[in-house]
Amino acid sequence: MLSLRIRPISSRRMRFWPTQPPSFRETLEQYSSELMKVTNSLLGAMAKNLGVDPDVLIDKFKDEMQSMRMNYYPPCPQPDKALGLSPHSDASGLTILLQINEVQGLQIMKDGNWVPVTPLPDSFVVNVGDVIEILSNGKYKSINHRSTVDLEKERLSIASFQSPSRGADIGPLPELVRDGVEVYYNSMNYGQFLNLYTSGKLDGKGHMQFIKKQKPSITQPFLS
């Protein structure tokens, strides 16, 4: 795995950026810029679907953080006894995944079952992350997913994580919780949320308990 911070530019640690092949850094810079355009387009469409002005959602990512993880999963002689990546949801807003050599390995949880995501040529898979679940007040759910390994084939992928800045506050958009609509999530600084996310192991969506509102417990009245 090669994991790099791409944006903001001030967060880059260039000593970790490979110099071979010579085109790597320039190509990654261009790829990063194009993915930001894709992200804004997706956020705009999602905002319209939620019934809010696209700029309301896009502005949450105006100083966005972007990181990329380049994954190599070698063939595994006992794929039924190994995982490429444990079940989890992403702490990002959106995760844009490129399955380079189109070897199936991504699985998502749907209705209690793990469902394989078949790679399509020349396409991205876009996962909804925790931030979008929170901002949308649960209308969009972040996806619990995992990676498996193959008996005979290697798998290559690049995941790009598109997130707000660490200093941004995340909570349900005010436009979505008007007129008595129940608020399902607390507001929290995104940097704090990331710290909570990274302080534990990858284990489904258990970390979301820290930001979900707890329903008041119902107690029986005292009867004399």
Image (cartoon, rainbow, N blue to C red):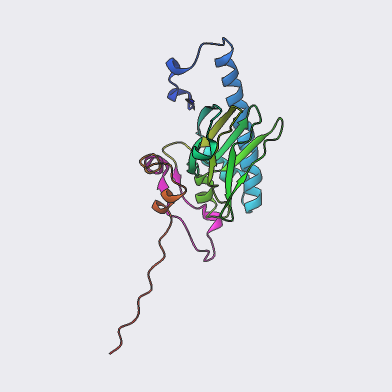
Q: Tell which of 28 and 189 is nearer to you.
A: 28
Q: Residue 8's spot in the image, x, y percent? A: 48, 27
178 left or right, relative to 121: left
Furthest residue in direction front, as rendered: 77
* 100 relative to 189, above or below: above
- Asked if residue 185 is among those painted magenta in the image, a careful observer would answer yes
Quarter of the C terminus within the rendering: bottom left
- Which of the 4 image quadrants contains residue 99? top right
Q: Residue at x 59, y 27 (%)?
A: 154
94 left or right, relative to 223: right
Q: Residue 114's spot in the image, x, y percent? A: 58, 48
Q: Residue at x 40, y 42 (%)?
A: 197
Q: Tell which of 130 and 87 is nearer to you.
A: 87
Q: Residue 155's spot in the image, x, y percent? A: 59, 28
- Asked if residue 186 is among those painted magenta in the image, a careful observer would answer yes
Segment tinted magenta in the rendering: 169-195
Q: Residue at x 43, y 25 (%)?
A: 11
* 139 relative to 180, above or below: above
Furthest residue in direction right, as rendered: 121
* 36 relative to 187, above or below: above
